[in-house]
Amino acid sequence: MPASAKPKQRPPRRPPAPKPYHHGDLRRVLIDAALQLAAEGGPAAVSVREAARRAGVSPGAPFRHFESRDALMTAVAEEAQRRFRAEIETALAEMPADDPLSRYRGFGLAYLRWAMRNPAYFEIISSGRYFDHDGAAELSRDNAELIAMTERMLAEAFAKGALRTGELKPVLIAGRALVYGFARMNIDGHFPRWGVADDELERTGEAMLDLFIEGIAKPPLSARA
């Protein structure tokens, strides 16, 4: 090859096309594709067209299952909520059944950990910007059941003499605001300015939750002198 000649550059490789979808539950495949898109680029990255491309089907195929992006996002939110609830139930299964305040703490800790590890999914289920909450019957039912679960824990803790107050509604709302607000601070990028590094988030959240539990718990008899 002459010294002045330049080697030919190969054209850049295009990403491989998705494998064509042949059989199975297309609705499930589309939801999984949309969840992956949200995890990679946030809720705004989800589109019916891109979910179809990842599923290996034509752009029109998803509309047999989802009439709009809002319908797809509703299904995504319901699946994210299902995973969220499964995380909480797994955590509670490891907690003592006869210690409602410890179970309440375990619930809050599972909430925080799931929200920290799945910020895009938490953003979807906690915000009204991405789908019609009123049209998401499964999500609304799940959320109502989780709220009722925390109410029962607090009522049982009070009945056992473990709470400072029987006014449970303010405690219930304060606890929800605490974990929700912490998760939102993470999504909105507030923690660096508070000097909290990414690897300190869960530990900081746990310490915050413990301070709250300490504040609502009735002190033991030995400390009431």
Image (spheres, rainbow, N blue to C red):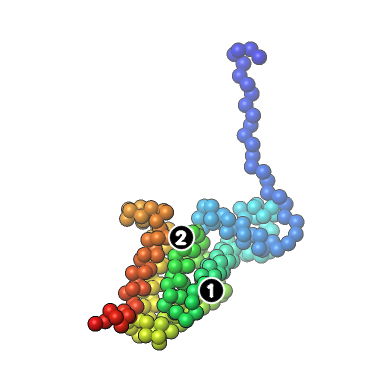
The percent position of residue 3, horizontal first and vertical second, equals 60, 12
The percent position of residue 56, horizontal first and vertical second, equals 69, 52
Q: Nearer the viewer, residue 39 or 61?
A: 39
| Quadrant in which residue 196 is drawn | bottom left
Q: Residues within 10 Å of mark 2 (few under 14, many from 20)?
A: many
Residue found at the very far left of the displayed protein: 225
Tally of numbered discs: 2
Q: Nearer the viewer, residue 131 or 202?
A: 202
- Frontmost of labels 2 and 1 is 1
- Residue 116's label in the rendered image is 2
Q: Nearer the viewer, residue 2 or 163?
A: 163
Q: Earlier in the sequence, mark 2 or mark 1?
A: 1
The percent position of residue 43, horizontal first and vertical second, equals 51, 58
Q: Name the residue at 41% across, 53% down.
A: 198
Q: Name the residue at 42% across, 58% down.
A: 187
Under circle 2, the secondary element is helix
Residue 81 in the figure: left or right of residue 222: right
Under circle 1, the secondary element is helix
Q: Name the residue at 51% across, 61% down.
A: 121
Label 2 – label 1 distance at C-alpha: 21 Å
Q: Is 23 above or below relative to 138?
A: above
Where, quadrant-wise, is the C terminus in this rendering?
bottom left
Q: Is 88 above or below relative to 12?
A: below
The amino acid beneath tag 2 is: Met
Residue 215 in the figure: left or right of residue 147: left
Q: Which residue is mark 1?
A: 93
Viewer can see residue 171: yes
Viewer can see residue 58: no
The amino acid beneath tag 1 is: Ala
Q: Residues within 10 Å of mark 1 (few under 14, many from 20)?
A: few
Residue found at the very far bottom of the displayed protein: 159
